[in-house]
């Protein structure tokens, strides 16, 4: 998406207001936000229609421990609910993906706005017929690197003091210590990197590598979104690798490639169209690993019995949320059919293929039916 300068200024004014009002904690934000709901709706261009969450549940600031810096990140509530409402993902909410301002409201760091998986959102269902660049989607953690005053900083998209932020800043210090590296770093540029490290490994194995890989960059004053040529020049300047570019012919070919189940140890690609639209495409083999790791009927039933099913669902990556809801729905329909308890748990047995319906799984099914009949 193209970033609107006025939208950035609007969120920057919010940062300066929070700084002036001495809001510097999550608790302080919660109280302030509830008292300024209408103001927040105007800032974020958000209209709360029936069934939509309140605006103050959708965006959360994070505060630097020593510098007058305020970042904004969309919340898990936004992540899990806004896809149900056309227009819910406003431009202002979408730029709150680790964006950072100083206490005066000036832009300090500009990361990627929220972008979606192929087919997940209206804008990614009918892709534009225009030139595009596709680069490897690396499977580490996003690092947002920027200069403030005389120093270099790295943050994740929601916390200056997260474990990954602390790790990333240690790695960054080694780069800054290189001769002339700091002077080579362009002024007013936000550098976006994938933090590749054993501590940030998710599903793709990078063989113990410890490095930054450039995946994007923005100019804070012009809001320029660097294309691949620009990223390559930054990589040469800073002696950093740049995410590899796909050299295929068209978007349909790339979409079909994602179904190739012979591909292992790769996540997918990020497509950047000439208009600025970004789309994520992930290999089916990668999504399969996510499902296998995160979801099972046994796990869902146990979470249901302990009363924290929704809290668990709220932690799922967006790619898995709909899959989880379908699985929960299948359990619900099976459980609420007619019949004796024995008939109900035997129907639950049959959700899985016979070779996967183990004694342990069947025991959980029986426990689940007994629990639900006494709730």
Image (spheres, helix red, strand yellow):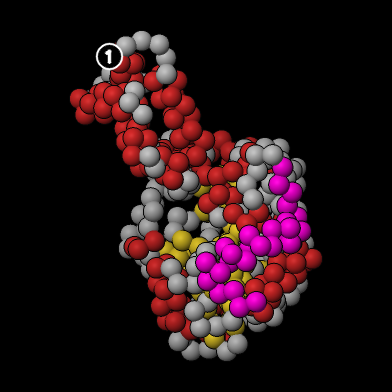
Image position, residue 327 (x, y; %):
44, 29
151, above or below 98, in the image: below
Residue lying at the far left of the rendered structure: 359
In this view of the protein, can residue 63 be seen by the observer?
A: yes
In this view of the protein, can residue 72 be seen by the observer?
A: no
Question: Which residue sits at x=37%, y=35%?
Answer: 304
Q: Is mark 1 on a helix, strand or loop?
A: helix
Q: Give the range drawn in magenta.
A: 21-49
Q: How many marks?
A: 1
Image position of 226 (left or right of 159): right
The residue wearing badge 1 is 342
Residue lying at the far right of the rendered structure: 6
Q: Identify the image quadrant of residue 96.
A: bottom right
Question: Which residue sits at x=76%, y=58%?
Answer: 42
Decide whether residue 227 is among the magenta residues.
no
Image position, residue 193 (x, y; %):
52, 66
Question: Which residue sits at x=22%, y=26%?
Answer: 363
Q: Identify the image quadrant of residue 38.
A: bottom right
Instruction: Tell me the quarter of the image containing the N terminus.
Output: bottom right
């Amino acid at each position: 998406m193209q970033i609107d300068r006025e939208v950035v200024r609007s969120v920057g004014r919010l940062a300066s207001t929070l700084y002036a009002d001495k809001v510097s904690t999550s608790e302080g934000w919660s109280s302030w936000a509830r008292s300024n709901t209408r103001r927040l709706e105007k800032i974020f261009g958000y209209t709360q229609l029936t069934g939509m969450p309140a605006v103050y549940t959708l965006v959360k600031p994070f505060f630097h421990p020593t510098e007058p810096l305020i970042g904004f990140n969309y919340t898990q509530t936004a992540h899990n609910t806004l896809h149900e409402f056309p227009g819910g993902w406003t431009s202002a909410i979408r730029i709150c993906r680790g964006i950072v301002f100083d206490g005066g409201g000036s832009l300090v760091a500009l990361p990627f706005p929220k972008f979606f998986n192929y087919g997940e959102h209206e804008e990614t269902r009918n892709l534009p017929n225009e030139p595009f660049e596709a680069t490897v989607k690396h499977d580490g953690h996003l690092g947002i690197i920027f200069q403030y005053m005389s120093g270099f900083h790295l943050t994740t998209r929601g916390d200056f003091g997260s474990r990954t932020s602390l790790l990333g800043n240690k790695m960054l210090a080694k780069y800054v210590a290189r001769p002339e590296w700091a002077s080579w770093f362009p002024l007013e540029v936000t550098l976006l990197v994938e933090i590749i490290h054993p501590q940030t490994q998710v599903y793709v194995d990078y063989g113990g590598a410890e490095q930054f890989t450039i995946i994007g960059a923005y100019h804070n004053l012009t809001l320029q979104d660097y294309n691949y040529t620009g990223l390559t020049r930054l990589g040469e300047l800073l002696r950093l690798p740049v995410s590899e570019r796909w050299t295929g012919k068209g978007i349909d070919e790339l979409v079909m490639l994602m179904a190739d189940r012979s591909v292992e140890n790769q996540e997918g690609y990020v497509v950047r169209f000439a208009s600025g639209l970004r789309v994520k495409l992930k290999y089916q083999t990668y999504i399969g690993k996510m499902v296998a790791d995160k979801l099972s009927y046994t796990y869902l039933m146990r979470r249901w019995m302990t009363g924290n099913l929704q809290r668990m669902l709220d932690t799922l990556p967006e790619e898995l949320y709909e899959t989880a809801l379908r699985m929960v729905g299948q359990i619900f329909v099976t459980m609420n059919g007619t019949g004796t308890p024995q008939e109900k748990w035997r129907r639950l047995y049959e959700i899985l293929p016979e070779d996967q319906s183990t004694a342990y799984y069947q025991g959980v099914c029986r426990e689940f039916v007994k629990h639900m009949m006494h709730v």
